[in-house]
Image: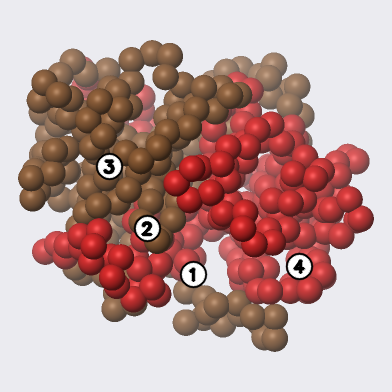
Chain colours: A red, B brown
Amino acid sequence: MNKYFSKEEILCSDSFFRKNLINCLSGYKSLNLIGTKNSKGLSNLALFSQVFHIGASPPLIGVLFRPHTVKRDTLENILETSSFTINQVGAAFYKKAHWTSARWEGSEFEKTGLQEEYRNGFFAPYVQGSPVGLGCSLVETQTLQVNQTVLVVASIDHIYVEEKGLRDDGSLDLNVLETVTVSGLDEYHLGNRLARLHYAKPSKEVEEI
Amino acid sequence: MNKYFSKEEILCSDSFFRKNLINCLSGYKSLNLIGTKNSKGLSNLALFSQVFHIGASPPLIGVLFRPHTVKRDTLENILETSSFTINQVGAAFYKKAHWTSARWEGSEFEKTGLQEEYRNGFFAPYVQGSPVGLGCSLVETQTLQVNQTVLVVASIDHIYVEEKGLRDDGSLDLNVLETVTVSGLDEYHLGNRLARLHYAKPSKEVEEI
């Protein structure tokens, strides 16, 4: 049985109800911590559900930022230094990751107990213990006309993955890595594999790998 | 134990290995079928892992399309008609959803056995049995300079959700809805809830709702 909402009903609904519902509509979302440092050396760590694949050759990744109308440390640090890290959130530290979203003074690393780690001279800090860490550099930004959301496009320059999750074909076993996914604003999940499926062809129904 | 890849190593690696790895780096991705129809009445259905939340007030959603250098039926139909549906993929039909990605002649609805459904006079077809169906209209497109990827931004005008997954606070229980998530190119998963967490404050560690 379906429940229907028109756009008008949504716009007139309670804002908390609306935020919860609209944030759930796209389905499960990626969950990553973004590490940055400003030019004065102050580090910052923030949780994002809006990181997505853009291209494999060259390796590109995108991050969507809420409108740049209030202070956004992560976005400002990226625009200032061009450097940031993307760190997948693991089940062992997702509560600390959530805690980074509180309104802290100073670095979220110190406050939440997540450890910053500097690797191979890269400017921005990685999150120690993250199953996948990416060292990224700014390539391009686009600002959406409709609501001033900012899309940051970055080059993936350094990749660190926990070996136990790396398969021979290059794919990652996110179940083994205990990577966390998020739905809506506040609900965290592990993935539970159904199957990998062979490349689809019209001539036969899809088969599991 | 971490395995490290530099950008140079990635660019020199086997293209299959590279695609698998880079597509896994952002973590779990949303999984949705996009339904469209061209002005001649031919319907189309295609699987996307690049649908994401853009804003709640007004409700906006984004879809990222590979470079528009070859024929892209979904993108062309959206640009032509401004109308499309986004349908979350459920566990009951994820294999049929995967099959839409084969190179079909004619409508993927007929070929894969997924049923198209027209609701309240909306131009584009919904997928019958999808736990969440959205009727969307084109608002804006942005083309990335770096690789000609096209970002489509759309207004969410109609929302249909299966009642069993809708909570009183507006959030959706994606575990109950059996919404599927994807990692990499071909690996499908269900979500398995860890917890919902209270709004984060500096004054105390995060707590489960």
Query: Circle 4 sits on which residue?
Result: A108
What amino acid does circle 3 point to?
Answer: Ser
- Indicate which label's residue lies in the foreground, 2 or 4: 2
Q: Nearer the viewer, residue B113 or A166?
A: B113
Name the amino acid type tagged 4: Glu
Residues at discs 4 and 3 both on one chain: no
Q: Residues within 10 Å of mark 1 (few under 14, many from 20)?
A: some
Q: CA distance from mark 3 to mark 2?
A: 13 Å
Q: Is residue B115 above or below residue A192?
A: above
Find numbered disc 1 in the image and state the secondary structure of the residue it sits on.
loop
Within 10 angstroms of label 2, few (less than 14), some, or many (20 or more) residues?
some
- Residue B137's mark? 3
Q: CB of mark 1 within 8 Å of CB of mark 3?
A: no
Instruction: Name the amino acid type tagged 2.
Output: Pro
The residue shown at (62%, 41%) is: A152
Q: Nearer the viewer, mark 2 or mark 1?
A: 2
The residue shown at (40%, 41%) is: B153
